[in-house]
Image: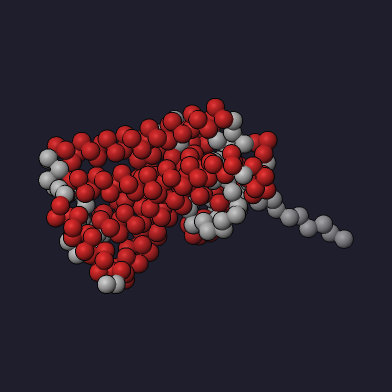
Amino acid sequence: MDPHSQMQAAWAHIITTYKPGVVEFMGILLTQIIGFIFPATLYMLIDILFPKFSQRHKIQDARRQPTRQQIQHCIKVCLYNHVWILAFHFVLTSIRGFNHAHLNLDPTVPSLTTFLVDFAFGLLAREISFYYIHRALHHPRIYVHIHKMHHKYATPVAFTAEYAHPVEHLLANVLPITLPLYLKGAHFLSIMAFSLFELWEAAADHSGYDFLKLPPAELHGLHHEKFRVNYGTIGLMDWLHGTDRVGWDRPKTKQVKIAE
């Protein structure tokens, strides 16, 4: 039996055994744990278990790394953001007795081509939406009330990816990943697969390590260090808008010709 047929058989068993709301909620819960909490924890364990390797591959200087107390506080806030999103979804599905799902639980598993198309669409849509939302959060009138909290950690660690004000967590972390594919009518499995990648990418982007070049953690590490640079996730929108280099917002000095 080929992998697609095996996935189809497993999916058919799941949706015929459990209520749609239960399938949806458990899928979202597992995606959060596997996609973000588990890899973020592994990144943090590198500091403890392999200190020499950690020091060799940290993007920013060791003296700028957050303290243990700061990291513990970060993890608590991060987990709180996960819990309230899950609790909100649990309430929405439980009201209807878990008999209905909000996402597309089609009994037919999408083909590999459909998965790839959904992934490419989600990647582009997330890059565009996140870039503009992120830049808006840097507006002086908004930044101090919402986004400043995320930039408390000038030297990021994996869990700082979701260390954010609840409004920012919803607008910048959750919706750019899930809403475009939801509006497209993508299959729940496509949304789960894409969310798994994006959650891992967020943890890797904020990990502070350079040993993985995809995603390029240096880009977002520089954003936390310098603030007004690299607002996107993959660099496309920053390249288009010229915000991919430090000093893009400074007035250019005019060169004065000196007569000989």
Q: Quadrant of residue 186?
A: bottom left
**x%, y% of residue 133?**
41, 46
Please identify the quadrant where the C terminus is shown: bottom right
**Residue at x-position 21% and y-position 52%:** 103
**Residue at x-position 23% and y-position 60%:** 10
- Residue sitting farthest toward the front: 1
Coloring scheme used = secondary structure
**Residue at x-position 47% and y-position 44%:** 40
**x%, y% of residue 131?**
44, 50
**x%, y% of residue 143?**
47, 35
Q: Of 241 and 34, which appears nearest the observer?
A: 34
Residue 133 seen from this side: no
Q: Of 131 and 159, which appears nearest the observer?
A: 159
**x%, y% of residue 86?**
29, 38
Drawn side of residue 115 relative to residue 36, left or right: left
Residue 53 seen from this side: yes
Q: Of 101 and 139, which appears nearest the observer?
A: 101
Please identify the quadrant where the N terminus is shown: bottom left
Above-or-below relation of 38 to 148: below
